[in-house]
Amino acid sequence: TCALPIFAELEANLPNRFPLPDEFTWTLLKPATVKSAAGAVTEIQPDASVLISGTNPETDSYEIQLDSDLKDVAALRLEALIDDKLPSKGPGRTPHGNFVLSEITASIAPADAAADAKPLKFTHATADFSQEKFDVAQAIDGNAKTGGWAIHGPGNGNVNRTATFVLAQPAGFADKPARWTIKLEQQHGMQHTLGKFRISLGRRNATSGSEEERRKKHFDQKFQAWLNDTQKSLVRWE
């Protein structure tokens, strides 16, 4: 009987061992423009990331403009990226590499009528890690003074991190390209600003069935693939 709790623990951890495929299909977009309100240098990299250098202000706000012909965009992904050029490799610009994303906002307009931009609403946010008391949900609560998303915690905090922000309604135009404007507010102070980041737009994947049904199907597929590989390596005795 002493083994039963172990099996229960292993079974409970199966969703982590076999996570569902990403809910979204992501399209990486190279920014058209990036501006720092505090005058930092913004360098768009070949991989569509943005590296920040130059003046290192206490607070800052970045405005990123992206052009895209995608329609039915359901989410935005923000990657905070490490780089050897950043303090402690970043991904933030503090000496220890942390940052606080106070608030993220987005708007969309026809690419040929940028003045007609309409604000978009995020309904929820997730991240692969959030610092205690700095949950990623605080970055979409409409208040840049209520903390925000930060990433330091146990272990090495100087690693790539990802946050996903889901829109209330799909966005994009069926017959024309769009100009997206993303603003990253970083008002925590003490140089807690992003040093390198990248933005993608996501369209929701077609799914059917409940999460439990989809998870079981995904697990069965993974198990069958493992079984097939294992059978190929078995030695057949005649």
Image: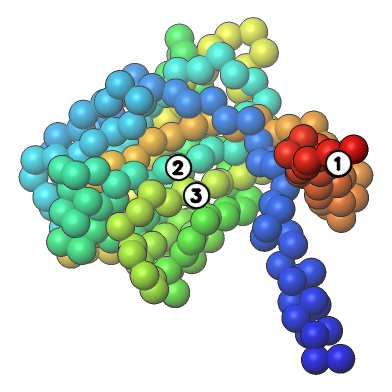
Q: Which residue is mark 3?
A: 163
Asked if the residue under mark 1 is in contact with the one under mark 3, i.e. CB atoms within 8 Å, the reply is: no
| Image x and y of residue 23, in percent | 69, 41
Q: Earlier in the sequence, mark 3 or mark 1?
A: 3
Q: Which residue is mark 2?
A: 78
Disc 2 vs disc 1: which is toward the camera? 1
| Image x and y of residue 160, in percent | 38, 49
Whether 159 is drawn above or below 130: the answer is above
| Image x and y of residue 176, in percent | 58, 9
Dividing the picture into quadrants, the one containing residue 97 is: bottom left
The residue lying at 68 percent from left, 26 percent from top is 72
Nearer to us in this view, 39 or 98:
98
| Image x and y of residue 222, in percent | 77, 44
Q: Amino acid at mark 1?
A: Trp
Report the residue that reaches farthest toward the front. Answer: 238
Nearer to us in this view, 226 or 44:
226
Work out whether residue 9 can be spotted: yes
The residue lying at 50 percent from left, 49 percent from top is 163
Label 1 packing within 10 angstroms: few (<14), some (14-19), many (20+): few
The residue lying at 49 percent from left, 32 percent from top is 200
- Is 224 left or right of 18, judged from the image as shown? right
Work out whether residue 118 can be spotted: no
Q: Which residue is mark 1?
A: 237
Disc 3 vs disc 1: which is toward the camera? 1
Q: Amino acid at mark 3?
A: Ala
Q: Secondary structure at mark 1?
A: loop
Dividing the picture into quadrants, the one containing residue 206 is: top right
Label 2 packing within 10 angstroms: few (<14), some (14-19), many (20+): some
What is the C-alpha distance between the residues marked 3 and 2? 5 Å
Asked if the residue under mark 2 is in contact with the one under mark 3, i.e. CB atoms within 8 Å, the reply is: yes
- Is 212 left or right of 195, judged from the image as shown? right
